[in-house]
Amino acid sequence: MFGIDSTVLMFVALAGVSAGAIAYALLFNRISDERNVGKRLQTIKSAETDRAVVKASRDRMAEAAKRRKSVQETLRQLDEKQKQIDLSVKKPPLKVQIRQAGLNLTMERFYLYSAISGLVLTLVGFVIGLPTIALPGALIVGSLGLPRWLVSFLRARRVKAFLNEFPNALDIIVRAVKSGLPLNDAVRLIANESPEPVRGEFRRIVDSQQMGLSIPEATMRMSETMPCPEAAFFGIVIQIQAQAGGNLSEALGNLSRVLRDRKKMKAKVSALSMEAKASAAIIGSLPFIIAFLVYLTSPSYILPLFTTSTGHLILGVSGLWMSIGIFVMRKMMNFEV
C-alpha cells in the first residue's frame, strides 16, 4: 500500500513539474517581453524626469542670464548717463551753476549784478588810491571773478548742507517702506518735512511725477540740480531696483550707511590735512604781516614798493609767484573722497 502511494505521489509530482516546465516554456517569451516592456517604461520615465530636470535647470539658467543681461544693460545705460552727468557736474554752464547754488536769477540779472559789482569795486579802488593801471584789473575781478566765486561758494555750501541731511532722509524712506508705505508717499513725506535743501530736491521729484515722469527718471535728474555723487547714487539705486527688482529698504539702508561712512572718511581726511592747511595759511600770511610790521617801523623803507613803477612790478611778480605757491599747496591738501 505504501509503495503504491509513493508511486502515485511521485507520478503526480513529475506531472506537476512537467506541466510547469511546459507552461514556462510556452510563457517564457511573454514574460520576457513584459519584463523588457517594464524596463523600457522605467527608462522612458527616468528619461522624461531627467529631461524635465534639465529643462527646468536650463530655464532657470536662461532666466538668470536674461536678468543678468538686463542688469548689465541697465548699468551700461546708467554709466553713460552718469558720465554725462559727471561732465556737467565738473564743468557745468554758468546757468546750471546758478541753479545748483539755489539762486533764482536769470542770466540777464546776473550779468547786471556782475557789472554793478565791477563798477563798485573799481570805484572803491579809485577812492582808496589804487594806481590807474590797477583799476582795469579791479573792474575785471569785480565783474567776472567775484560774482562767479560767490556762485561757487553758495553752490558748495548748498551741497554740504544737502549731504548733512540726506542720510537722515534715506533712513526715513527706509522706515516708511518697511512699515508698508509706498515709495511715492515716502518721497512726499521727505518733500514736506525735511529741511532745505533736501526738501527742495525731493519737491522737484514730486513735481516731476506730477508732470508724468516716473520716480526712477525723476531721481536720476536730481544730480542735475545737486552736483554730488551721493545724489547720483540714490538715482542709480532706485533705477536698478525698478528694473531688476529686489529689497528696496535694504538697498537704501546700505546706501545710507555708505553715505555716512563717506562723511566720516571726509571728516577724517580733513582732520589729517588740518596741519598742512594751517602751515599753508601761516606761510601765505607771512609776507603781508611782515610788510605791515615793516611799514609800522620804517615807512620810508617800504613805500617805494607802492609809489614807483619798479615797486609795482616787484609786487606784481611777487603776487604771481605767491598765487602759484598757494594754488599748488591747495592742490596738495585737497583730497577727493
Image (spheres, rainbow, N blue to C red):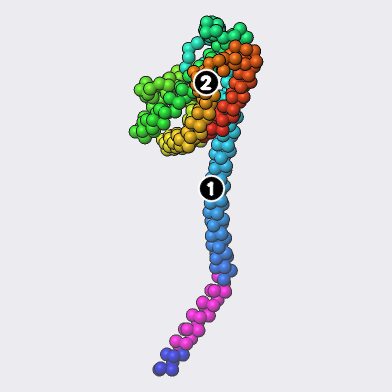
Q: Main secondary structure of the magenta part?
A: helix
Residue 194 sits in quarter: top left
Q: Residues within 10 Å of mark 2 (few under 14, many from 20)?
A: some
Q: For residue 243, say whether it is visible.
A: no
Residue appearing at x 44%, y 28% in the figure: 163
Task: Give the number of the mark in front: 1 or 2.
Answer: 2
Name the N-terminal-most of marks 1 and 2.
1
Q: For residue 328, say whether it is visible.
A: yes
Residue at which label 1 appears: 56
| Residue in the foreground of this view, choosing between 104 and 206 | 104
Figure check: 261 above or below 61: above
Which percent across, then down, holds residue 245? 48, 36
Q: Is residue 122 magenta?
A: no
Residue at which label 2 appears: 294
Q: Amino acid at mark 2?
A: Val
Which percent across, then down, holds residue 215? 47, 25
Task: Describe residue 308's horizontal placement relative to residue 236 as left or right.
Answer: right
Figure check: 204 above or below 32: above
Q: Secondary structure under badge 2?
A: helix
Which percent across, then down, holds residue 64? 54, 43
Q: Are marks 1 and 2 in contact (CB under 8 Å)?
A: no
Q: Which residues are magenta?
A: 8-27
Residue appearing at x 40%, y 21% in the figure: 196
Q: Amino acid at mark 1?
A: Ala
Q: Secondary structure under badge 1?
A: helix
Q: CA distance from mark 1 to mark 2?
A: 89 Å
Which percent across, then down, holds residue 93? 58, 18
Figure check: 241 above or below 154: below
| Residue in the foreground of this view, choosing between 220 and 37 | 220
